[in-house]
Amino acid sequence: LIWMLISSFKTNGEFLLNRFGLPKQTTYDNYIQAWNRSNFPLYFFNSTLVAVMALAVMVSFAAMASFAFSRYRRPSGEKLLTYFTVGQLLSAQVMLIAVYLVAIVFHLTDSLLGLALVYAASGLPFTILLLQGYFQGIPTELYEAAEMDGYNEMRIFVGIAVPLAKSASNRFGHTRLHVTSMRPEAASACTDSRTMPSNEASPLATFRDSTS
């Protein structure tokens, strides 16, 4: 990281002649070119929007599913939880072609919404397993006391279970904010729908053009 930071202040010619030394003359042209030529503001906004949408969908659906698995322990629920566990074992490369074909059928290609849904679906198994452990640690006496006070299931979930498991949701949000389990080009080939990872090649292309 230190070498990358130092090299970013060098010109292309100085970088080729002195790759590991300190820059003789500090320049900020690389940052200006990356900002202007690579459409950096648009890609940064797209990445932030996709991350927020994916986390909102993941945490919302995973919290409801985890609450149901921990509160209503039935054989069918245990089998369904096993499917989520198996889904955690599958890599993104195995599902890449199938996910792309599904995105084509539902017209979700070249769409930030489609990319966010892909990230949300790929993160659901891990989120459910994480939140279920927190929900199982909540004493059943709290649920029983809430039922005696007239709480329905939705009020129990929103008013009791979610606040007590809030630390797990915050921890998950900090560890999964990057949501880079799959390459965004699979769902966003349009330039206006690309995110930061898909923009990685632009500075390299600019560097090659300037040195050729």
Image: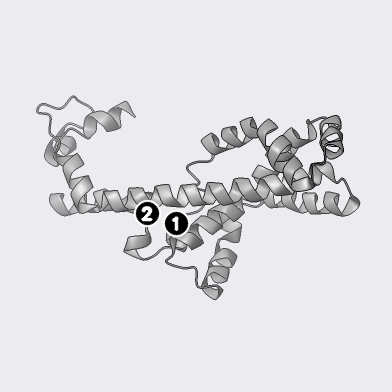
Position in image of residue 101 (x %, y %): 55, 71
Image side of residue 52 versus residue 10, left or right? right
Indicate which disc residue 184 carries.
1
- Amino acid marked by disc 2: Ser
First reached walking from the N terminus: tag 1 or tag 2: 1
> Between residues 137 and 209, which one lies in front from this camera angle?
137
Quick check: 2 above or below 49? above
Q: Residues within 10 Å of mark 2 (few under 14, many from 20)?
A: some
* Count of marks, rendered view: 2
> Between residues 128 and 210, which one lies in front from this camera angle?
128
Indicate which disc residue 110 carries.
none
Position in image of residue 155 (x %, y %): 73, 43
> Label 1's element?
helix
Position in image of residue 55 (x %, y %): 54, 46
Q: Is the residue under label 2 in contact with that under label 1 (CB below 8 Å)?
A: yes
Residue 212 visible within the image = no
Residue 156 visible within the image = yes
Image side of residue 181 versus residue 41, left or right? right
Find disc 2 in the rendering and name its residue: 198
- Amino acid marked by disc 1: Pro
* Distance from Cα at disc 1 to Cα at disc 2: 6 Å
Query: Can you name the residue that lies furthest to the bottom here?
Result: 105
Instruction: Identify the residue shown where x is 34% and y is 29%.
Output: 1
> Between residues 7 and 30, which one lies in front from this camera angle?
30
